Image: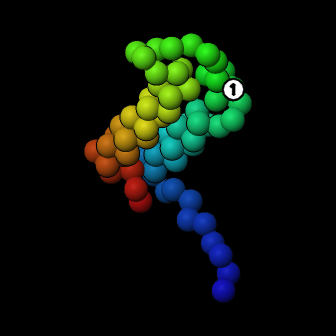
């Protein structure tokens, strides 16, 4: 069976793909290296705070995509 990829047809769809790709890029190893320091923020290591921010960004991205109807 041939594997296919469905490209987005609308601007909302492309915005959704770009938003998810942006959030994934923020969680990539090159960005994580910037936050892997021995700094304490709100009683937690900086990398843990960044991980929590990424979880919140992912959640808000999904909410935005749901609101605009970006899934084709």
- Quarter that holds the C terminus: bottom left
Q: Which residue is mark 1?
A: 33
x and y, in percent, of residue 19 in the image: 49, 39
Q: In the image, what residue occupies the spot 61% across and 16% down? A: 38
Q: Does residue 6 appear anywhere in the picture?
A: yes
Query: Number of callouts in the render?
Result: 1
Please state which of residues 61 and 2 is positioned toward the viewer in this rendering. Answer: 61
* Rendered residue at 31%/49% (across/down): 66
Crowd around label 1: few <14 · some 14–19 · many ≥20 (10 Å): few
Of 58 and 13, nearer the camera is 58
Residue lying at 28% horizontally and 45% vertically, measured from the top left? 67
Question: On the image, which quarter does residue 21 sit in?
Answer: top right
Quarter of the image for the N terminus: give it: bottom right
Judge whether 62 appears above or below 49 on screen. below
Which image quadrant for residue 59?
Answer: top left
The percent coordinates of residue 33 (x first, y second) are 69, 26
- Is 36 left or right of 44, judged from the image as shown? right
Q: Is residue 15 visible?
A: no
Looking at the image, the residue that sits furthest to the bottom is: 1
Q: x, y percentage for residue 5?
A: 60, 66
For residue 43, above or below residue 1: above
The secondary structure type at the circle numbered 1 is helix
Drawn side of residue 25 relative to residue 49, left or right: right
Q: In front here: 4 or 54?
A: 54
- Percent position of residue 71, x then y: 40, 56
Question: Residue visible at 42% across and 46% down?
Answer: 12
Residue 3 vs residue 59: left or right?
A: right
The scheme the figure's colours follow is: rainbow
């Amino acid at each position: 069976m041939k594997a296919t990829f469905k490209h987005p047809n609308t601007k909302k769809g492309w915005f959704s793909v770009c938003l998810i790709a942006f959030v994934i890029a923020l969680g990539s190893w090159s960005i994580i290296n910037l936050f892997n320091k021995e700094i304490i923020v709100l009683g937690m290591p900086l990398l843990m705070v960044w991980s929590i921010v990424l979880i919140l960004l992912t959640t808000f991205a999904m909410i935005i995509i749901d609101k605009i109807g970006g899934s084709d």
